[in-house]
Amino acid sequence: MNSKKFPRTFWIANIIELVERWAWYGFFLLLPNYLTGSADQGCLEFSQAQKGTLMGIGTGILYFLPVFTGALADKWGYKKVLFTAFVVYVSAFLLMPICSTYPSFFAAYLLLAVGAALFKPIPSATISKTTNEGNSSIGFGIFYMMVNIGAFFGPLVSLLFKKGDPKMIFYISAAIVAINFLLLLFYKEPERSEEEKSQRKSILDIFRNMACIFKDFKFVIFLLIVAGFWTMYNQLFYTLPIFISQWVNTEAMYNFFVNYIPFFANNYSMAPGVMDAEFVCNLDALYIIVFQLFVSSIVMKMKPLHSMISGFLVCTIGMAMTLFFQNVIFTMVAILVFSLGEMAGSPKITEYIGRIAPADKKALYMGYSFIPVFLGNILAGVISGPVFQNIADKVTLVKRFVTENGLSVDSNLSQSEFFNAAATQAGMTPNELTQHLWDIYTPSNMWMVVFAIGIFATIALFIYNQWLTRSERRAANLADSRH
């Protein structure tokens, strides 16, 4: 592909996105286990329900605010808003490691959400403004690949520092996101039409512009359907790291690395025979780096809705499979299936909205493209919070086991100490107790919840596409009859 098809601003926006995603996923993929992990490992020991509420509401707000920040970026200029976003970002990352109580960490996370929300709509709007119908599929494919390069390397770097002190992940992210202050010097404001330049800059106008979105009934229905996809998709970050750390046997992966690539076994394992859960989850980003352009070249000729329907279905099957097996080999295959669906469906959402957005409201519509992600995060917090806690959380299940079997274990112990004490009293090793809990409580039933949500979104989008196609045909027939 000839890179001259895209202007310099296209590439700068992609690099800025890569750096921001590096900083974000460098802590976000590690966040669930940091929030809920054992205190003797430097973690906070919040419950799964607390984790789900914090991540669901906090991240949900992050994706709701671009409804406003996208409009503000259109009015005030992308470059000014980007600078503000990076200042807030760095400040929040520096605050989070000193917060150990639930309210204080929640407040710091909300500040981070504000910084991310200021940033969110601008790179995708820049990509939309610097591509056309002929190269938008490849353009957004490159954009999504950049996202996943950052998403892949972020956790790998953070995990190297996590062993000494889990709080280091926040300082690493602060340093990485600060790189964007330098990149901003090379970012050129995308050209605006005369209509955009002549728009008044009152806050009232911004709200009036946003109100027009709700008049686009078909667009609103589309956003609600896609929210189901994001609810299922977000389990990759909310649930899967914890599920792997609690239930999946990663010894086969560990032994492979010991024999062939010792660096990974030495730096990405919690203990001999146990790989970091986040390292396993990170395969999703690796698969996308390797296969995204190939998949984009296949689906580029497909209608966006057709590609999304196929992607949603494959993604749903893959995510459900990740929560069904205890063997890491099956988990790796399931993540590959999930990532193939993600590559086919997710970039097409942004492309579809970019295509149908009016030229003078690109950032505004891109801001609204995050509404289903907002709803998906809120619902994902519920699924990974109280639902996961009741069905599959090993901390909850071992406490249930202790109560049901009349064992006496000190509740003041840390999570790992409590589990080991329960295993000792039950006459088992910790691994034997884990298997016993898996057999009697079937935490793998979480796959059914996730599968049901994804299938609902897939079927709803299929029906939406059929309805849209019939509406277009009726409109075309009506136009022909008038001629």
Image (tube, rainbow, N blue to C red):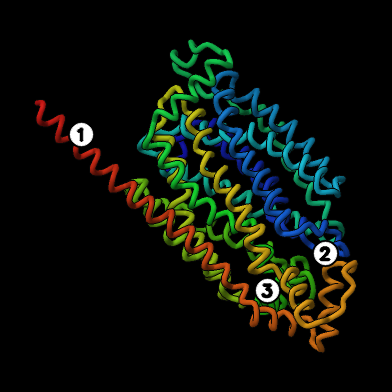
Pointer 3: what residue?
A: 247
Residue 452: x %, y % from top left: 47, 62
Pointer 2: what residue?
A: 38
Q: Residue at x 58, y 51 (%)?
A: 379
Label 3: which secondary element? helix
Instruction: Report the amino acid beneath label 1.
Output: Ala
Task: Using residue 174 as the reference point, say whether residue 381 is left or right of it.
Answer: left
Position of residue 193 relative to residue 402, above or below, is above
Label 2: which secondary element? loop
Q: Evaluate if marks 2 and 1 touch, with contact meaning CB atoms under 8 Å apart.
A: no
Find the distance from the CA under tag 3 to the CA under tag 2.
Answer: 16 Å
Circle number at residue 475: 1
Q: Residue at x 63, y 49 (%)?
A: 150
Viewer-proximal residue among 4 and 316: 316
Find the distance from the CA under tag 3 to the CA under tag 1.
Answer: 54 Å
Viewer-proximal residue among 365 and 133: 365
Label 1: which secondary element? helix
Instruction: Report the amino acid beneath label 3.
Output: Trp
